[in-house]
Amino acid sequence: MKQPDYTPLTGYPEYSEQEMLVRARSVFDVLATRRTIRDFSDKPVPRAIIETCIAAAGTAPSGANHQPWHFVAISNPALKRKIRIAAEAEEAAFYTGKASQEWLDALSPLGTDTQKPFLETAPWLIAVFAQKRGGERVGMDKKNYYVTESVGIATGMLITALHTAGLGTLTHTPAPMNFLRDICGRPKNEKPFVLLVTGYPAKDAVVPKHALIKKSIGEIATFEV
Ligand code: IYR
């Protein structure tokens, strides 16, 4: 068994409580303007921006620090078209049979349907994969832990990074998503987790009012002091 080896913590300057509140509010202000976008511009986004946001997501905490994720960033038009065709086929099955009436009713205020043109319009699709097995280094074959939690946290950080950089995002989850593994050429131990669509919002982009209703702090948190 390996003994832990430690190094001094860095990156936590001490702010005044007043400054901490200002900083917390500014993070709130940034995150509260995030919207799920379905109308994307086709304006190209430099690869370096996407790469940096993925690198930020890769700093997420994970079970045993195994970092059980892989991100495939796709700007290739032929691949985007393949993904659109496969996703729309899954969505057709979903909207015309698989989904319960309760589910369809829950989605109706969002205005979603089987058509996913943004999968070709948006400059980048980021397919996020979860690795059942892996380890702290690429190429290892150890069991991974808390895979869903870890990849969920990393995806949240990726959305935060993309939004903070000024890009719109859509968390797209056609179900089942196994076609993504084949199209992206990923191995069997990886499960598609989410397909993130990202780019500039279209100039005339709209969002459903339904999406603006957020539960209040009093509804989502309880303080026991
Ligand atoms: N994957 C489908 C359906 C869908 C499901 C949920 I839950 C949403 O919040 C939105 C859509 C689609 O993308 O249309």
Image: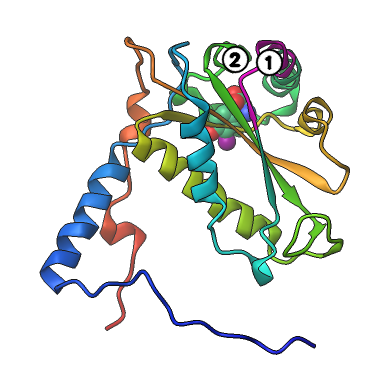
Residue 181: which quarter of the image?
Answer: top right
- Give above or below for 72 relative to 93: below
Which mark is nearer the camera, 1 or 2? 1
Tell me the SS state at disc 2. loop
Dots 1, 2 in contact, CB < 8 A: yes
Quadrant location of the N terminus? Answer: bottom right
Disc 2 designates what residue? Answer: 116
Q: Is mark 2 within 8 Å of ligand 1?
A: yes
Q: In terms of sequence position, does the residue under pointer 1 or pointer 2 come before the other?
A: 1
Disc 1 designates what residue? Answer: 84
Q: Position of residue 134 (x, y in %)?
A: 80, 59
Residue 202: which quarter of the image?
Answer: top left
Nearest the viewer among 206 and 82 is 82
Q: Position of residue 10 (x, y in %)?
A: 39, 73
Q: Position of residue 94 (x, y in %)?
A: 71, 24
- Give above or below for 70 relative to 75: below
Amino acid beneath label 1 = Arg
Is 183 on the left-hand or right-hand side of 147? right
Label 2 Cα neighbours within 10 Å, binned few <14 / some 14-19 / many ≥20: some
Is 152 on the left-hand or right-hand side of 41? right
Magenta part of the chain: 73-84
Q: CA distance from mark 1 to mark 2?
A: 7 Å
Taking the image in four quarters, ligand 1 sits in the one at: top right
Residue in view at x 44 percent, y 15 percent: 39
Residue in view at x 62 percent, y 59 percent: 149
Q: Magenta includes 190? A: no
